[in-house]
């Protein structure tokens, strides 16, 4: 049964019919509701009169509930909410103030009323009005079913969480034990923005990114992370606990930021849940638990929520952030600075026009248009899904490379490559439709992630998206360097020997073990430039035996028809050796 587009139990319906009989004022109704159940401001004037009219059984609305999953709205089922509260209660937690920052249908509030007997005040905040009513109806249903239960003062506020003053609660109740519990939205600010949602924080560079990073995606952030940090800012010096269901990436980011932020939270723990079972979504998520008003912790213990079995610990060790502290200790010798700079591939945001295939001697784009182009600006092109083999000599796709460096004028294309220019000009609307601000004010048909490094003939690459700890040697195609897209990372070489030595080192068991100890497999990008730059290939070369290097060279020569030997090994080592060390060797 539904009233106000939300669920109401028969028990509550019957109760309200009787409770509000002969009550004509919402002020009187609110006072009666507060006296009976501790719920403040249950009605406002308009809703009160609408409810009176709707209480007749014949007027119950049976309309289906809207799907709000696109807003990151995955409502916590009653069983999971109760398990979370029971888990906290077993830790001898006895909060006096309970705050549910995005209370939804109220299941965490009901779970808190069921499991914590010392609660004096409950605060719930929710932007979606039907959920506000469902929470109120659920609280009524709980007290009607459990008439002897303790009834704290309960305030359910209908508003945007980013407009709510949490610091006011902290000031009002400076000594009471606090519990922040709930399940904030599993969605990013850019996603909500695309849906024209009003439930967004004020425009800001949340992560304090600079320049290109802020414009190309690093400025995007998880709403739950913003909410969590907002709550920590308001309550970090207040005695109590925080327990929120969030995506794994949020827990990782909060622990990562602790090194600089130093929020006064300790005993940080992550309890991994089965999101498919609990929410029917394929998202890696967990219960984030921490103690407020504690010495800042820079590591997190990870457990299974259901068995409570400890899996691992992650966080900061000295100046290094790692995903598995125990495993990291075994390979930490190669955690340093890579002697070669890792680069990201080309970003064009115009795949339907820029990405081509060669069919029967002609180029065909993603729209299946047959295109006639000069060959000069067309290069072999690899995406993350292509980086499966150890060595790649041929590509299935090609791309048009309009610039040799970022910001280069592209007017030359019209004069030197008229067919290419005609094709690009014909499809100019596709380029103009690119949403990223990085293209604003740039020459026609601009791309990013392009430079001298892009034209290195031999590359060692890895996908940033896939959970495979495997590197690929990319060889030239038709005597031209092969390009990669911006989901890939690579280092480039002028000598094939250097590239082969590098891939042997990078595909070693030592490298794989190290990368597994510092990467998070549930991250949107498992590998990033910052992470790959930690690979100290010089130290790695000292750990891998010469015999192993020789064996791998023989294997690669035989399988991929290469002709490599160790004649350039010493030169390769010298290339990786810092200048200061070279000088010490010369004058030593």
Image (tube, rainbow, N blue to C red):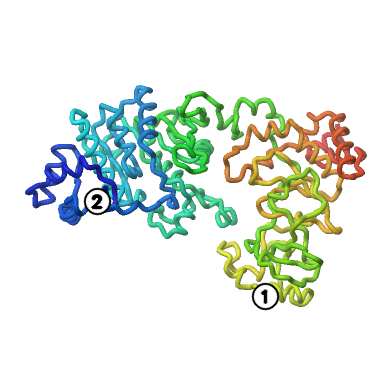
176 to the left or right of 570 = left
**Which quadrant is home to the C terminus?**
top right
Residue 128 vs 36, above or below: the answer is below
Locate residue 422, reporting x and y percent: 71, 76
Report the label total.
Answer: 2
Locate residue 556, reporting x and y percent: 86, 40
Q: Residue furthest left?
A: 22
Residue 383 vs 150, above or below: the answer is below
Residue 570 vs 222, above or below: the answer is above
Residue at mark 1: 425
Residue 533: assigned label: none
Q: Could you classify mark 1 by the number of other residues whose Cα lies within 10 Å: few (under 14), some (14-19), or many (20 or more)?
A: some
At horizontal 41% and vertical 29% (from top left) the residue drawn is 291
At horizontal 38% and vertical 23% (from top left) the residue drawn is 91
Q: Quadrant of residue 135?
A: top left
Q: Is residue 237 visible?
A: no
N-term-proximal mark, 2 vs 1: 2
* SS label for mark 1: helix
Residue at mark 2: 3
Of the pair 42 and 254, the residue shown nearer to us: 42
Locate residue 141, reporting x and y percent: 23, 38
441 to the left or right of 74 = right
233 to the left or right of 398 = left
220 to the left or right of 46 = right
Of the pair 500 and 375, the residue shown nearer to us: 375
């Amino acid at each position: 049964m539904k009233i106000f587009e939300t669920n109401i139990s028969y028990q509550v319906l019957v109760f309200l019919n009787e409770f509000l009989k002969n009550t004509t004022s919402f002020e009187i109704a609110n006072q009666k509701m507060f006296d009976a159940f501790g719920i403040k401001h249950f009605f406002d004037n308009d809703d009160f009169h609408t409810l009176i009219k709707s209480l007749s059984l014949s007027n119950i609305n049976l309309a289906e509930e809207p799907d709000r999953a696109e807003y990151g709205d995955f409502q916590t089922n009653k069983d999971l909410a109760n398990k979370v509260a029971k888990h906290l209660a077993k830790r001898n937690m006895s909060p006096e103030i309970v705050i549910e920052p995005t209370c939804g249908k109220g299941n965490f509030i009901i779970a808190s009323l069921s499991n914590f007997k010392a609660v004096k005040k409950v605060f719930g905040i929710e932007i979606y009005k039907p959920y506000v009513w469902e929470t109120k109806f659920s609280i009524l249903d709980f007290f009607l079913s459990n008439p002897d239960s303790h009834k704290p003062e309960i305030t359910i506020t209908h508003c945007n969480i980013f407009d709510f003053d949490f610091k006011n609660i902290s000031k009002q109740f400076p000594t009471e034990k606090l519990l922040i519990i709930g399940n904030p939205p599993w969605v990013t600010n850019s996603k909500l923005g695309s849906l024209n949602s009003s439930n967004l924080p004020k425009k800001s560079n949340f992560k304090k990114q600079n320049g290109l990073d802020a414009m190309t995606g690093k400025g995007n952030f998880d709403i739950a992370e913003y909410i969590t940090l907002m709550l920590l800012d308001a309550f970090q010096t207040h005695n109590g606990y925080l327990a929120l269901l969030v995506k794994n990436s949020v827990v990782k980011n909060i622990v990562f930021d602790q090194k600089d932020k130093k929020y006064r939270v300790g005993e940080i723990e992550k309890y991994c849940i089965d999101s498919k079972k609990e929410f029917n979504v394929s998202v890696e998520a967990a219960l984030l638990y921490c103690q407020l008003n504690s010495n800042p912790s820079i590591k997190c213990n990870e457990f299974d929520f259901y068995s409570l079995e400890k899996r691992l610990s992650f966080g900061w060790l000295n100046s290094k952030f790692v995903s598995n502290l125990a495993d990291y200790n075994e390979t930490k010798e190669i955690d340093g600075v890579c002697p070669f700079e890792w680069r990201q591939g080309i970003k064009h945001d115009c795949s339907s026009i820029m990405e081509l295939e060669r069919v029967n001697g002609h180029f065909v784009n993603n729209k299946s248009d047959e295109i006639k182009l000069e060959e000069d600006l067309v290069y072999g092109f690899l995406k993350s899904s292509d980086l499966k083999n150890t060595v790649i000599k041929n590509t299935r796709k090609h791309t048009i490379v309009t610039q040799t460096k970022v910001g280069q004028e592209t007017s030359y294309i019209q004069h030197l490559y008229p067919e290419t220019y005609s094709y690009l000009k014909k499809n100019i609307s596709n380029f103009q439709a690119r949403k990223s601000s990085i293209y604003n004010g740039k020459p026609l048909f601009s791309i990013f992630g392009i430079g001298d490094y892009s034209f290195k003939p031999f590359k060692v690459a890895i996908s940033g998206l896939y959970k495979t700890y495997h590197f690929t040697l990319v060889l030239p195609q038709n005597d031209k360097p092969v390009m990669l897209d911006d989901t890939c990372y690579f280092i480039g070489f002028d000598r094939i020997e250097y590239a082969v030595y590098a891939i042997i080192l990078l595909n070693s068991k030592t490298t794989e073990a190290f990368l597994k100890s510092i990467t998070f497999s549930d991250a949107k990008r498992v590998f990033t430039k910052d992470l790959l730059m930690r690979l100290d290939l010089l130290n790695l070369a000292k750990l891998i035996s010469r015999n192993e290097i020789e064996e791998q060279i023989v294997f690669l020569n035989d399988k991929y028809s290469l002709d490599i030997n160790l004649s350039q090994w010493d030169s390769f080592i010298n290339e990786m050796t810092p200048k200061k060390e070279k000088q010490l060797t010369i004058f030593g």
